Amino acid sequence: MTRALRRHLVAVAVVAALASLTLASSLSPAVAAPARSGTTVTAVISADPPSLDPALGFDPISWSFIHASFVTLLTFNNSISIVPWGASGMPSVSGGGRVYTFHLRRGLVFSDGEPVTAQDYAAAITRILNPRTKSLLMAFYQIIAGATAYSDHRARSVSGIQVLGADTLRFTLVRPDRTFLDIMAIPNASAVPPKVIARNSAQFGLHPVGDGPYVVQSYVPGREITLVKNPTYFEAKQVSVQRIEITIGLTPEVEALRVENGSADVMMDTVPTPVYIALRTDPRFRAYLHHFTAIADNYVAFNLTKFPFTSRRVRQAAAYAVDDQQVLRAISRMGTPLTQILAPGMPGFDPSVEPLGYHPERARQLLAQAGHARGRGLPVLTFAVATGGFTAGSNVAQVVQQDLERVGFRVVLRVMAPGAFLSSLGRYPLTMGIYGIDYPDPYDLIASQFACSEIAAGNNWQDYCNHAVDRQLNASLGLSLAQSIPVYRRLQAQIFAAFPWIPLYYQELWYLVNPRIKGFGANPIWPMMFANWRA
Amino acid sequence: MPGGEGEVSRWAPARRRRLLDAGRVLIRRPSGAVGLGITVALVVVAAAAPVLAPHSPSTQFTDGLTSFGAPVGPSRQFLLGTDALGRDLLSRLIFGLRNTLQVAVAANLIASVIGVAVGGIAGYFGGWLDALMMRLTEVLLAVPAILLAGFLALVTQPSPTSLVLIIAGVNWYYLARIVRGEVIAIRVREFVEAAVVAGAGPWRILVTHVLRQVWSLVFVYMTLQFSTTAIFVASMSFVGIGIQPPTPSLGNLIADGSQYLTSVPRLAIIPGVLLAVAVLGFNLLGDSLRDALAVRD
């Protein structure tokens, strides 16, 4: 369930309290002076980051904070290329692609003054693999030799992690795997101070001690987080903003009003559709809006094991029945039609692939050919949708519902809280789905959503299973990214030909930022790059 | 013969006269007339929704949204404009009112039947049955109704029927306590003792003699409770556990509209005002009924 739970963590609670009506209406969205002068930036966010502990945080917001306060050996730059950060260069690869050797750069120091060593990186990965940590990331790092034995308590250490000196670290994998560099670049692979962890591992997320650009000066869950610049960070001179004060617990609508009236600089949640409608045409806020296309798929998953979606014809009919333009209008055109599994921005995305299109007559014909003319013999289909930002929400679901009913399906919506939604996966014939990348390799998007093993893991929401596809996916890991792209393009075409989804859209994410804040370039993997901000 | 059919028939004209007097008092009071007017108007609109609504409440019109996906404003085609999915807001309001009232009325009736039954039995028979029923009622009273209803709604498949049963299930306690108190007072009155002497069975006495004395109280309570139940239905829909989309209700119309408060405020304000007017109407009617019946009693 790791990545399914991650989707839960990504969710933004957007059910507004009635009280907010009064509050929101009383605030005038007039452009005002910035909240703070100098190098203090104020931000607002609707909910706490799930965890600031590198072993536990596994969602874009947690990653934003962890990336601000810890240093990984590698990282992703804004064009999502892997670059060295805590390492002095890219690792040397040997042993037929199984052995990776890293050298640390000089001058890495934790904010408590302790020097950072290779042992601290080894300890961080070992901690993730320790079942007592209850890390959602454990499966990622079990590609390291001996990791499974360690996690199963059959070994006292991870044989594939070798500390060769204070600044040299070697990882040996069970098989060649190109994506190992990706999982060493996500913020979870950050060095952690063993002494601090030994004192209080459980509370590390509330009082993290890292070596990154910022120190978490205070964190009061549900109320505020204050980050201050870390003077011991090895590139401290490049960090401009001295202090970032983040208020927690506002609805996105109120967050937007705070930024509009100048009492906050940055809205850390994405701008909701209704607010976007108001701001889009307002010239006062043109300079406030920043956007990028999320590397994520939004779709409706058929349950391929449940009647009537065991029939490819019926799935095809449903896919043709949905008006993609009406779907886009329901999200105020904050997106583009989904054409393939590999989203724009992901290596391997093929811009020449056309959207499936809206063909209601063809849909009716296909239904008739499947023996269900005008919906004859079809059961009432339950369509599971999660509330809030967890999936596209009930608005898009209602568009899909109406379009399906126009060609003969009978559909009832089941709108659920994210927890109930996740526990219902596999129960309903239709599920509103979203999948965002963990790391920018095509393998992640395709394998996570379509490998047979991911059904039990709770990520393959359509219960698609094709062992031939699985074999090609596994074989692709030993190829370079460039070599593997034709394989992935072929595989996604093969998977799409089975119509496992009603494709919906790739969402454009909008952020509201006071123009006095420069350098706000949202990273496609974690949205906030605090260290790049300038005020 | 006391307690016999002859007595009931002699009482009937008196009760009719009392009702007529109460009706006159109600209409003469401005608040009563306003409450009655609002309630009747809302009930008529709700009952005639299929005739009055200019469009289907669920149809998403392609010309109901701008090319950019924003709701369109009031026009000849859409008198109150459209909502976020291009549906006619007026039609959704009319059907939303109908759906909310249907659930509120049904839930209120069921809650009243349960409340009268529990309160009547506990109050008339007393003893261990009274103790058991009232302790159960007190336990349930200790749990916030909206939380209990929310929990029940989450663990059951949401449907109008389940919603009615859930709301009824968490709304009968107060009436049960009130009816019990009244019944305890009535059961020692002479006409009840006369019925016992005449050989009437306890159930017959309870139903035909005792509960008959509390009907005005129950009627007033039900009228006042309509407003509470309507808000309850709206609250459950507001937090997403009530009437499910695309079926409109005042609660989910307010919830959906509240997100558009800064861009299209009418989406929240119009259903909010309608709910407020409905609650006001029920409250005025209930208050005036209570006063009118109390005068006669």
Image (cartoon, coloured by chain):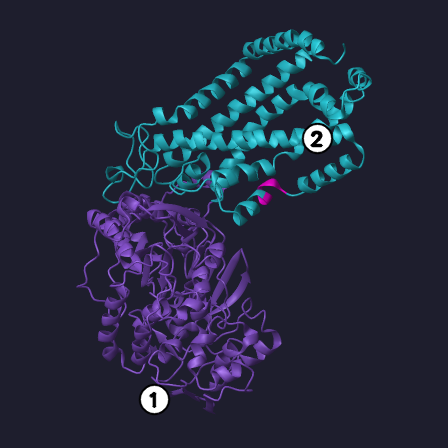
Chain colours: A purple, B cyan
Q: Main secondary structure of the magenta part?
A: helix
Q: Secondary structure at mark 2?
A: helix
Residue picked out by circle 2: B119
Q: Nearer the viewer, mark 2 or mark 1?
A: 2
Q: Which residue is disc 1 drawn over?
A: A92
Closest to the observer, B46 or A268: B46
Q: Is residue A272 above or below residue A532?
A: above
Q: Are marks 2 and 1 on the same chain?
A: no
**Does residue A454 sit above or below B155 in this rendering?**
below
Callout 2: residue from which chain? B
The amino acid on which the numbered mark 1 sits, given as a three-letter code, is: Ser
Closer to the camera in the image, A531 or B228: B228
Q: Amino acid at mark 2?
A: Gly
For the residue pair A215 and A163, the one nearer the viewer reads as A163
Q: Chain of mark 1?
A: A
Q: Is residue A535 left or right of residue A344?
A: right
Is residue A114 shown to the viewer in this render? no
**Residue B172 seen from this side:** yes
At a point 55% along the width and 20% down the height, the residue shown is: B285
Q: What residue appears at the point 42 percent right and 66 percent down from the top-left corner? A: A64
Mark 2 Cα shell of 10 Å, populated few (<14), some (14-19), many (≥20): many
Magenta run includes residue B146: yes
Residue A221, given in percent of the width and then of the height, sits at 55, 59
Q: Quadrant of the C terminus of chain A?
A: bottom left
**Which residue, as the protein is rendered here, is positioned at the far left?**
A352
Magenta residues span B144-148
Measured Cα–Cα span from mark 2 to mark 1: 81 Å
Q: Is residue B135 above or below residue A485?
A: above
Picture residue at 61% right of the left edge, 73% below the top: A200
What is the x, y in percent for residue B157?
Answer: 49, 47
